[in-house]
Image (cartoon, rainbow, N blue to C red):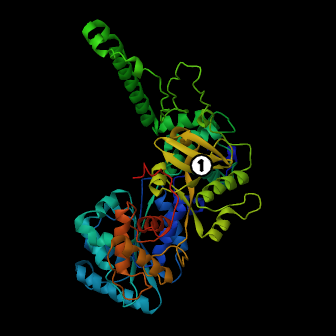
Amino acid sequence: MYLDYFRFDREPFSISPDPSFLYLSAGHDEALAHLQYGLSHGGFVLVTGEVGTGKTMLLRNLARLTPENMDLVFILNPRLTAKELLETICDELNIRAEGEGNASIKNYVDQLTTYLLRANEQGRTTLLVIDEAQNLSPAVLEQIRLLTNLETDSRKLLRIILIGQPELDAMLARRELRQLSQRITARYHLGPLTRAETSAYIAHRLAKAGGDPELFTPAAQSALFRLTMGIPRLINVVADRALLGAFAHRQRQVDARLVRTAARELHVGINRTWNAWWSLAIALVLLLALAALWVFWPAQDPQRTAARQPDPIPAAEAAPEVAEPAFDSDASAPVQAPAPDTASAPVEPPTLADAPLVRPDQSRYQLQRHAFHDVLARWGANYPIDAAPAPCEFSPTQDLLCSARNGTLADIEALDLPVVLEMWDDQPEPWYAALLEMQNSTLLIGVAGEPRSVTMRQLRDKWFGNYTVVWPRPQLYRGNLKPGDISDSVTILRDLLEEASGKTLPFTIINLFDENLAAALADFQTREGLTPDNVAGPITWVHLFRRTGERSMPTLVPAVEAR
């Protein structure tokens, strides 16, 4: 209806999973990488995500990436019995089992094994992809596990990818499915888009449809993120209705009012916001009632009032003391204790948190280099801002590496390393700050080379999860290590795991990432609170270095508060 009005070639926010509209956020890029890993490796790959986060869109793109020598089996309706599952796989591969409808599970498995062995001899591989896998029963999951036993001496005959909602993780945590869970060689949980990614996602889809990428005002983009919490499907639904509203009102841009109206008509986000306001109002009423009770009740009871009076202080103990400033996590500045009434008392200068957290008057390029300079200084590296290569090209010269990530302040606190934060405001490109220390609710950041104390609330208004961590490069490091890899750095990994666990790990080939090493790595990752994905990536190496003392590293949390 509004296509001609906005000069679109096609609907920009259709909820159908059109692969040409794929927007690769950091999370979607990582999830797609895990799916591509499943194309080339045996065992299981597991990708989970909430409803509407874009899992099916990724599957459509995976089909386009499938090599010509691979047979792809898609199962979109997994509410099947074990026999029905095998029958469906055989049907997709044009395998005819003896007895057809009366064939037993053994008949289907035998025919499937014969087919896979023949395909392997011809240089072909087979990939089984099961969508909505949270609907699989434990019995069917166990049958799928048994299919991974189909192998030659050197390779698995069947590769399997499971896609599902978070309930799938809970199901695989059951004791009776632990054998299946242990065979998962790569896991990833796809989260919603960040605030910055939501804006980029909207512009991407508008441009793909032939429209103006700036059709939604910055305020409208903020409203979309707030109401949809970054869920792509909800963004599509609300944005589509908002465009219809703009067409009906003959507006050339979509503003926040149209977005809120569209969300209200679709019942998206409104109940959550309404309940939050009611909860806040009730809390305020209760707080006022308690305050009134505290103030007025003692006035009606002289004995209670007298009991609350402090004992007189002897003259020798009456000298005033300067109290330490107390910090409030929700305030924009520290709450100072009352100054003593004496002319000789020093006047405290205003703290750096008194000023609002705003983008300095410098370019994105300059701010990024200042932030990396502050972080690298914590590693003892002197990064010359004005005449240096890019920060992550300079880092390897100091035996350090960069890793771009997305997470929460709790994730960064657990990592316990200074990081570079990607900050956003109403401008179209980000700016950068260095997170250098965390102490209670107060954060020390570096902005344009200047130290700055801020509260978590101040930071959350500008930071939406993207950060870059500088970490020590392991010896002989050539990239993430995973089961099946043969590399000299595998030997380093095995040595560190043995030191961290206090156990000797058996092996067949010293530099082969075998099943014993994978099990030991998964056990270490679990103990450290990491996702046991059997992949030795940056975060796993950081935890290994910290547990073994192999490398000296700066900390983010002061030692007195380190957990």
Location of residue 549 (image quadrant): bottom left
In front of the other: 294 or 96: 294
Q: Residues within 10 Å of mark 1 (few under 14, many from 20)?
A: many
Residue drawn at 22 percent across, 67 percent down: 176
The amino acid sitting under disc 1 is Ala
In front of the other: 332 or 141: 332
The spot of residue 32 in percent (x, y) is 51, 66
Q: Residue furthest bottom?
A: 121
The spot of residue 457 in percent (x, y) is 52, 38
Q: How many marks?
A: 1
In front of the other: 381 or 111: 381
Location of residue 209 (image quadrant): bottom right
In this orientation, does residue 301 appear? Answer: no
| Left or right relative to 507: residue 303 | left
Reading the image, the residue beneath label 1 is: 196
Q: Is residue 148 above or below residue 288?
A: below
Q: Residue furthest right?
A: 387
Q: Is residue 227 above or below residue 210?
A: above
In this orientation, does residue 363 appear? Answer: yes
In front of the other: 156 or 468: 468
Residue drawn at 52 percent across, 62 percent down: 553
The spot of residue 555 in percent (x, y) is 50, 56
| Left or right relative to 464: residue 115 | left
* Element class at badge 1: helix
Location of residue 404 (image quadrant): bottom right
Q: Is residue 501 above or below residue 259?
A: below
